[in-house]
Image (cartoon, coloured by chain):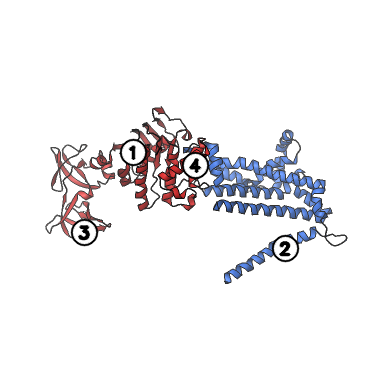
Amino acid sequence: MSTRVARGALWVVFGLFFLFPLYAMADFSTRNLLQGGRSMAAWANLVTDEALYQSIITSLLLAVLTVVVMLILLVPTMIWVRLRTPWAKGVVEFLCLLPLTIPALVVVVGLKNVYLWVTYFFGESALTLTFVYVVVVLPFSYRSIDAALSAIDLGTLSEAARSLGAGWATTIARVVVPNIWSGVLSAAFISVAVVLGEYTIASLSGYQTLPIQIVALGKTDGPTSVAASLATLLFGFVLLLVLSLVTRRRRHA
Amino acid sequence: MSTTGGGVAVELTDLTRTYGSVKALDGLNLKMEPGEFIALLGPSGCGKTTALRILAGLDKATSGTVTVDGKDLTSVPANKRDMGMVFQAYSLFPHLTASENVQFGLKMRGSAKSERASRAAEMLELVGLSEHTHKYASEMSGGQQQRVALARALAIRPRVLLLDEPLSALDAKVRTQLRDEIRRVQLEVGTTTLFVTHDQEEALAVADRVGVMSKGRLEQLAPPAEVYANPATPFVAEFVGLNNQVPADVSDGSAVVLGSRLSTLAGSIASGSGTAMVRPESVTVTADESGAATVRSVAFLGAISRVYVELADGAVVYAQLSSSQARKFAPGQRVAVGVAPSDVLVVPAAR
């Protein structure tokens, strides 16, 4: 009984700790600073302020593109390395974790020359940040996919699939991915969170993503900036919630 | 039940497989008759699993050919070989139910949904799991999982059924049960089957012919009773339970072993002194105050016991007796040791 009380108390304490800032943000962003009372003007700005709205769209597109490119690049590579070239595992792991150790400033300076070519081929779009972001999210994605792959008997499952007539692509899509689904999902969601929060690289490269806009707005229009931040946070929470729900359903399926 | 995939002939010719400097297979030749059940038996590292994996297409031979039903499959990938395989490790797809697992191979072959479902039901009934079609691997016991794996392998009407130590992860009782079940199902569907195991009892119990392997080569390929009674080489003799090595004198096609004169098996030395391979259950022990041997220890194994006896020359042999007989012996006791009349393999003494 006492453990139940202690557990309840902990829930309340941590709940307050996490929710209070959110409540404060919600309160501030709905306050009418001039006349008093409540106003949804700041929240309306999220869609009516053209620059802010565009930056939200840009950031969401960046998040989606980053996740897609990252998964297409990483999942088959990691499966292949584990099955066929286990000796290369160390190298791949090192390469994937490397971005963590390189400061964003160095990345930007280093990429200047590469981006001359990127913009030459793809045009001067903020979406070209996808390439940098895929590199930036590699360490996080690698970790969660690697953990999921370690949890299954990849060798036996893929051999079973192949002996039953499945080619490599089918084996990966129908057998391996469904069984590392939770790892793939968490890699995707962590990547989304990283992309939506990335400031340094976007700012130094001069692109208008959501974090850049939030900071710029913060100087002139506090409530709108806070509303945008809160929206980003809530979006992240919803993603995590979806993640836990989906993985739980799979386990009990 | 129309489950027959039809037996086909399988031939492995001069298979060699080297890993670096290690020779896993060293010129293996194996011919399987249509519908035959062959067990490859040998210690770990003898190449039996490598042979099976090369037949499955999961490993590549360094040289040699694989022929199934007269066709050379050596360079055909695993997914195009039409072979059903049951693995040592649990291999059911965790995200699919038993029935969906069984249907997987049929789906790869593009069969219609209704046909897949009825085939899966038929196969699960064949392995006695009709009640469990909607269960996931995590909800089944090890034995049940291996049954589903067997059903899944057979569902595609494979040309050859490959069993890679499918019983070794199971406990003793389930192992015997499933072993007999595998044989029953195999006889029912008539698929040519290669079964790899390190357990001689398993191999002798189910196979039409047993192939005993050592160091990448086939030492003997013969029906179980023959492998047991007439081991072709000392290795086979030792591996199938002839593990007492007793000094023997050979002359005129017979040998004197522990005081008895026995006929020698083919492959024995022609004359002179050598080492006889004697099965523990052929060794007799009688209480005898003036006996030349001494009981060293008695190991109780349930229905049977093993009595370890030190001979006059210091060599130790052991006898397998029923426990009621073995109770009469105690360590230190003087006994006389003999050997029951049976043909015996005598090999050169220097081993």
Q: Colour in which chain A is shown?
A: blue
Q: Residue at x 63, y 67 (%)?
A: A10
Q: Chain of mark 4?
A: B
The chain coloured red carries which letter?
Answer: B
Label 3 sits on residue = B324
User: Under tag 1, what secondary structure?
Assistant: strand
Marks 1,4: beta carbons within 8 A: no
Quarter residue B182 falls in: top left
Do callouts 1 and 4 point to residues on the same chain?
yes
The alpha-carbon separation of the residues under discs 3 and 1 comes to: 37 Å
x, y percent for residue A78: 56, 42
Callout in the foreground (1, 2): 1
Residue on which disc 1 sits: B38
Residue B268 relative to residue A67: left or right: left
Residue at label 2? A20
* Residue bearing mark 4: B117
Residues at circles 3 and 1 in contact by the CB criterion of under 8 Å: no
Q: Secondary structure at mark 3?
A: helix
Image position of A35 (left or right of A15): right
> Which sits earlier in the primary sequence, circle 1 or circle 4?
1
Upstream in the sequence, badge 3 or badge 1?
1
> Do the residues bearing badges 2 and 4 touch, measured as CB atoms within 8 Å?
no
- Are there few (<14), some (14-19), or many (20+) residues within 10 Å of tag 2? few
Is A10 drawn above or below residue A143 in the view shown?
Answer: below
* Quarter occupied by the C terminus of chain B: top left
Residue type, mark 2 in image? Phe
